Amino acid sequence: MEQPLYEKIADQVELQIQEGVFLPGTKIPSVRKSSKQMSVSVATVLQAYSLLEDRGVVKARPQKGYFVQDNLPLPESTPQFEPSQAQESVPELIRSLLHASQRPDIIQFGAAIPHTQFLPIRQLQKSVGRLMRLEPEICAAYEFTPGSLNLRRQIAIRMLDAGCNVQPDDITITLGCQNAMILALRAITVPGDTIIIETPTYHGLLQAVDELKLKAIEIPCDSQSGIDLDALEQVLAQWKVKACVVTPSNQNPTGATLSQSAKTRLIKLCQQQEVTLIEDDVYGELSYCETRAKALKAEDSQAEVIYCSSFSKSIAPGFRIGWIIGAKYQQQIEQHAYVESLAIPTLTQRAIANFLENGAYDRHLRKTRHTYEENLRRCQHSINKYFPEGTYTSDPKGGFLLWISLPPEIDALTLHKAAIEQGIGTIPGLAFSLSHSFNHHLRINYAINWDNRIEGALRLLGKMAKRLSH
């Protein structure tokens, strides 16, 4: 006799709890969300959750939802919060994945780069052309560290939207956000030091950890609530840590955004243990809300939060223009920036500064955010329609990255390799962790030109996933 559907759903959720996807005390997806994700009725999900209650796995909290029981033992796969270094294969794996995802014949679900239709190419072309016509000498000019004063002034103005009152002299222009984070880590760590990172996290940060010969403690990051602050508190009490690297808004890859109360607690925890917070806010401008979330830096009363961001996700990835607000480490950061790159191209800095001056950026962001949100809904709908039962997706409130949890019998790396053969690029979950976790997860980019070809690619990807689930 075939197992009832509600039992299958209950078994799936219980397995995810055992594997550490949902930790003791944390909330599982709501009944309505699970119903939508799995394309089943609300009544079926309620039956499944009721069965989990009978098994003593979850408990219902009135008006709040269903939560994993607090007294459940931690699964063996849950990180034990010990410092680790990148396994030898991690950087090599990431390089090979990125190389494959950049092939021109590949549908670009893999790399976190917006399609050119979502970038202000024409406006930048006009800006560059005007500068070349009126000031041709800037093509050959150096803009020494800390970078263009006009651009830094425009960034300081934009930072007001993030709740940060900074001066142009507080800002150093960098070669993108990745460069900014590496400069921050260089300023406050030496090889062998321990830092805290989220897991899963941006694969570029894992490469930085490897390059700088640091050790990292991975703290779980939930796609709904962000970094696990209880686990963070436990680690800070146990280990000597130099820095904590966090993406508080639209985290890569989970899409999580910290609540304001969580941000306040995070800052206090790090201040109490004298741990420097490094804020990666590269997706902060891409919130779907009318008012963007305040940065961690906005609550930095003691100049201990280092803020990193860039225009790579919103204006021009190829320009490689980012910035860092180094707080009390500003002098060391500027010195490292000067030694590493000497200067940033003047033309690209001036072109972006001009674009920011005339209000075009805000108009561009409004349009782009709306389209990304539409694409997200289309993407979620297609995944619910074509992927096997037991597939879950994140529900980001900004950015353009979707984190997909596949049924446990599906290996995401195997799916990735099969998809590449069919011209579809994804990045499997193990690329976002030092410990090769998240084998049943993958990340896709939905900042793409949505058409029948994209719909067909998701249909084919779902078909391959179903094949692997049998």
Image (cartoon, rainbow, N blue to C red):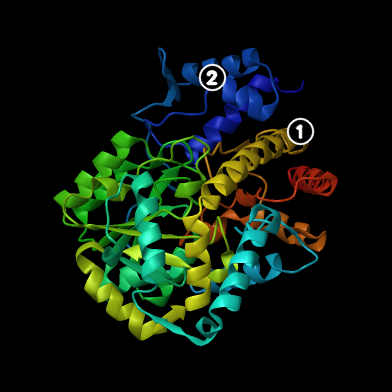
At horizontal 35% and vertical 72% (from top left) the residue drawn is 183
Residue 15 tag number: none
Amino acid identity at mark 1: Lys
At horizontal 53% and vertical 62% (from top left) the residue drawn is 312
Rendered position, 342 above or below 314: below
Q: Nearer the viewer, residue 17 or 339?
A: 339
- Extreme front residue here? 134
Residue 49 tag number: 2
For the residues carrying marks 1 and 2, which lies nearer the camera in this image?
1
Whether residue 246 can be seen here:
no
Q: CA distance from mark 1 to mark 2?
A: 22 Å
- Residue pointed to by mark 1: 385
Location of residue 243 in the rendering, given as x and y in whole percent from the top left corner = 27, 61
At horizontal 50% and vertical 63% (from top left) the residue drawn is 354
**Figure quadrant of residue 9:** top right
**Mark toward the start of the polypeptide (1 vs 2):** 2
Q: Nearer the viewer, residue 98 or 371?
A: 371
Whether residue 259 can be seen here:
yes
**Figure quadrant of residue 131:** bottom right
Amino acid identity at mark 2: Tyr
Location of residue 277 in the rendering, given as x and y in whole percent from the top left corner = 28, 56
Mark 2 neighbour density, 10 Å: few (under 14) some (14–19) many (20 or more): many
Rendered position, 93 above or below 28: below
- Determine the secondary structure under disc 2: helix
